């Protein structure tokens, strides 16, 4: 039977490992310790334990922290859960996420900022209940991180409570204030949120995935990281020699040198350097630009990130933990990549990938250079392969085919497209066939009609116009604006149900704003209603999307739906929207729920993803349990297809997969 206890908790910690490397690495430091624990049961008084002053954790509190029946509430609960596991159970131990509630995740569900300070301010907490941000930052810098020895503090490498009792008392107040603020935020969020049971199950599964972590090939990472460091030095020296510049990394100096070579330089961004290369035959300019391309390969820094953030298992193998953030994208609920950013890994196109990878492991970069002169590009393409399965296992990589197109067609009842999916037709071929009135059998993979269909399908689904089509590559085919507009018109004519859905959705949003309390329905479980100043969009799964301070404004003489949220720069501000953009949010959120249900279905069968990327899951499966590759691929892909999309009618989902002994894109 579930406990009625609710335990609000906040801790202050010390570690010589940088928190930027993730909480698992942070808590793995030999000198890690929990210094303060502030806590309160329900609406009771805030209690505090100063472990750094020699106080002990009461047995009853320790038991409640470990008891899955007791509800534990914290802001960014993964931090408290991981650090308290180290404190209570020891190095490398984990506390199950059952019973833990995270006010940061709840804030994201409500479309609010993720930081405690910002969410508290927007929810109207009293000044004394909000985080003492500037004071707290200084106190954390004083007590929670290693110090640089200076004569002014007697060469101390760490500040303890006895070193400044007044600051320690202030730090304790800061910790107590956090408990009060988190408790009030939890009360307010709980009053606004309706979280389905499957979503709490997904939160716990996410915690388990991050706890399990993914193994990395430490030898490969160390070899490539060492090469990159020395090679960048060589490239830098060559660039100095070639240009004669004192500092070729200076945009001003390099721009001036390139202009002297007859190039019109407006920028030295990655895209601009690529354009400049295509504009010159000057050999020295081309070499300089090629070197710049290689030195701008920021993706190769992931090797160092993997090595720095990895935690050693008992057997000495290295694992990266915490690579995913639950509900990282508040507008859809999708996961976000963290630390090594698995959501944004370079594609691998190297023809002899296993052989090149082995050369890199052995440090034979000269051999790689014979086949791939741009070795930095090759190193970038090997990043995926640094992620490896457990010993005696292999990865099964499986993803959904064209899931956003399938969900969009299902939501809008675009029957011809649903029929194409059910019959196993390629979506780009089917789209081109519908747009241009050509039999689908006459459209090959390399035909110009398919190319047009692909651009149109990718750019048009969310009400994209000429600009969107250009972003998806329309200009590469030499199409002018008139030709692109013709493509826009053809796609919309072929997808009249989707186009109609944009308009219906926009009207439903406006009606929900103008008639608070009313419920606007669109079929397939989609409904919209405003509660207070928040628009809630209920998805087929029962989960809700939230839009804060929803309203209609006059923008340039046009009625425009606006709301407040985190912008592209993560600043809180005003956001304008329209039917196609709301449709994009709903489609991507529904696709996210399909992935969620697929992972839950896999977990119930004992298949736990080590990480996932967009609509793809990566599972480590033992050979001894599943020796047959075809059998395990079928088991996982069929589970994914069966577990998700089961609403009033079934979304026609299809998953495909492959096995590999290191992560790669098939």
Image (spheres, rainbow, N blue to C red):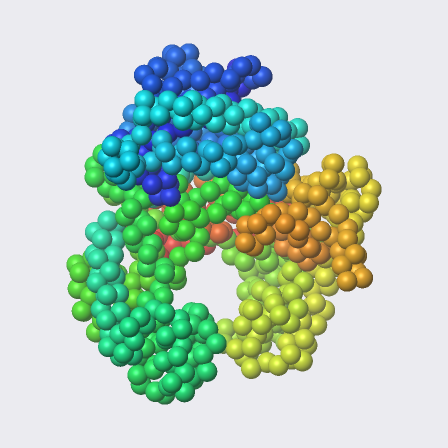
Q: Nearer the viewer, residue 330 or 482?
A: 330
Q: Is residue 146 left or right of residue 203?
A: left
Residue extending farthest to the front is 152
Quarter of the rendering occupied by the C terminus: bottom left
Q: Position of residue 328 (x, y in %)?
A: 51, 44
Answer with left or right where residue 92 lies relative to residue 118. Answer: left
Residue drawn at (23%, 65%) of the image: 233
Tell me where residue 258 appears, x and y as whole percent.
38, 81
- The residue at the point 71 percent across, 56 percent down is 578
Q: Could you say which quadrant of the image residue 4 lies in?
A: top right
Name the residue nearer the viewer: 54 or 166.
Answer: 166
Residue found at the far right of this picture: 515
Q: Is residue 76 above or below residue 570?
A: above
Q: Position of residue 627 (x, y in %)?
A: 30, 45
441 to the left or right of 396: right
Write down the quadrant of residue 541 in the picture.
top right
Q: Nearer the viewer, residue 66 or 129?
A: 129
User: Residue, x 47% and y 16% (percent of image)?
Assistant: 47
Horizontal and vertical percent for residue 628? 32, 48
């Amino acid at each position: 039977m579930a406990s009625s206890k609710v335990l609000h908790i906040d801790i202050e910690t010390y570690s010589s490992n940088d928190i930027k490397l993730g909480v698992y690495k942070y808590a793995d430091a030999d000198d890690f310790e929990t210094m303060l624990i502030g806590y309160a049961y329900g609406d009771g008084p805030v209690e505090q334990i100063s472990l750094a002053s020699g106080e002990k954790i009461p047995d009853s509190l320790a038991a409640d922290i470990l008891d899955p029946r007791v509800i534990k509430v914290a802001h960014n609960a993964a931090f408290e859960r991981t650090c308290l596991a180290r404190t209570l159970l020891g190095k490398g131990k984990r506390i199950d996420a059952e019973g833990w509630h995270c006010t940061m995740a709840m804030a994201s569900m409500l479309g609010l900022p993720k930081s405690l300070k910002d969410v508290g301010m927007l929810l109207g907490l009293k000044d004394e209940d909000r985080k003492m941000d500037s004071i707290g930052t200084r106190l954390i810098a004083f007590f929670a991180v290693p110090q640089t020895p200076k004569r002014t503090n007697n060469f101390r490498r760490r500040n303890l409570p006895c070193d400044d009792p007044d600051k320690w008392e202030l730090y304790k107040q800061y910790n107590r204030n956090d408990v009060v603020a988190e408790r009030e935020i939890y009360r307010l969020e709980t009053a606004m949120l309706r979280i389905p049971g499957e979503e709490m199950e997904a939160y716990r599964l996410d915690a388990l995935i991050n706890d399990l972590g993914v193994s990395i090939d430490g030898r490969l990472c160390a070899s490539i990281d060492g090469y990159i460091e020395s090679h960048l030095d060589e490239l830098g020296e060559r660039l100095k020699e070639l240009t004669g510049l004192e500092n070729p990394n200076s945009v001003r100096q390099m721009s001036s040198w390139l202009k002297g070579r007859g190039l019109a330089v407006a920028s030295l961004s990655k895209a601009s350097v690529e354009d400049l290369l295509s504009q010159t035959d000057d050999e020295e300019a081309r070499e300089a630009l090629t070197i710049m391309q290689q030195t701008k390969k920021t993706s190769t820094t992931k090797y160092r990130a993997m090595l720095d953030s990895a935690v050693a298992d008992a057997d000495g193998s290295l694992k990266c933990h915490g690579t995913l953030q639950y509900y990282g994208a508040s507008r859809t609920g999708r996961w976000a990549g963290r630390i090594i950013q698995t959501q944004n890994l370079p594609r691998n196109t190297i023809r002899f990938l296993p052989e090149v990878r082995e050369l890199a492991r052995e440090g034979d970069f000269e051999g790689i250079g014979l086949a791939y002169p741009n070795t930095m590009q090759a190193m970038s393409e090997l990043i995926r392969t640094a992620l490896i399965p457990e010993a005696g296992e292999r990865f099964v990589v499986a993803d959904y085919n064209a899931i956003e197109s399938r969900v969009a067609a299902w939501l809008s009842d675009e029957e011809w497209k649903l029929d194409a999916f059910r019959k196993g037709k390629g979506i780009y071929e089917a789209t081109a066939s519908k747009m241009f009135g050509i039999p689908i059998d006459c459209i090959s993979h390399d035909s110009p009609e398919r190319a047009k269909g692909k651009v149109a399908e990718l750019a048009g689904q969310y009400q994209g116009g000429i600009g969107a089509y250009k972003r998806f590559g329309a200009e590469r085919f030499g199409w002018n604006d008139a030709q692109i507009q013709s493509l826009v018109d053809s796609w919309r004519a072929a997808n009249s149900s989707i186009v109609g859905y944009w308009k219906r959705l926009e009207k439903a949003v406006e009606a929900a704003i103008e008639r608070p309390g009313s419920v606007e329905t669109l079929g397939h479980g989609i409904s919209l209603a405003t509660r207070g100043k928040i628009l809630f969009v209920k998805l087929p799964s029962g989960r809700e999307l939230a839009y804060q301070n929803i309203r209609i404004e006059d923008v340039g003489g046009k009625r425009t739906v606006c709301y407040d949220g985190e912008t592209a720069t993560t600043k809180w501000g005003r956001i304008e929207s329209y039917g196609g953009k709301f449709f994009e949010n709903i489609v991507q959120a529904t696709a996210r729920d399909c992935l969620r249900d697929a992972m839950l279905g896999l977990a119930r069968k004992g298949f736990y993803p080590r990480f996932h990327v967009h609509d793809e899951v990566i599972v480590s499966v033992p050979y001894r349990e599943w020796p047959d590759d075809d059998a395990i691929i079928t088991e996982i892909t069929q589970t994914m297809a069966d577990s998700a999309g089961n609403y009033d009618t079934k979304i026609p989902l299809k998953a495909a997969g492959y096995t590999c002994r290191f992560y790669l894109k098939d």
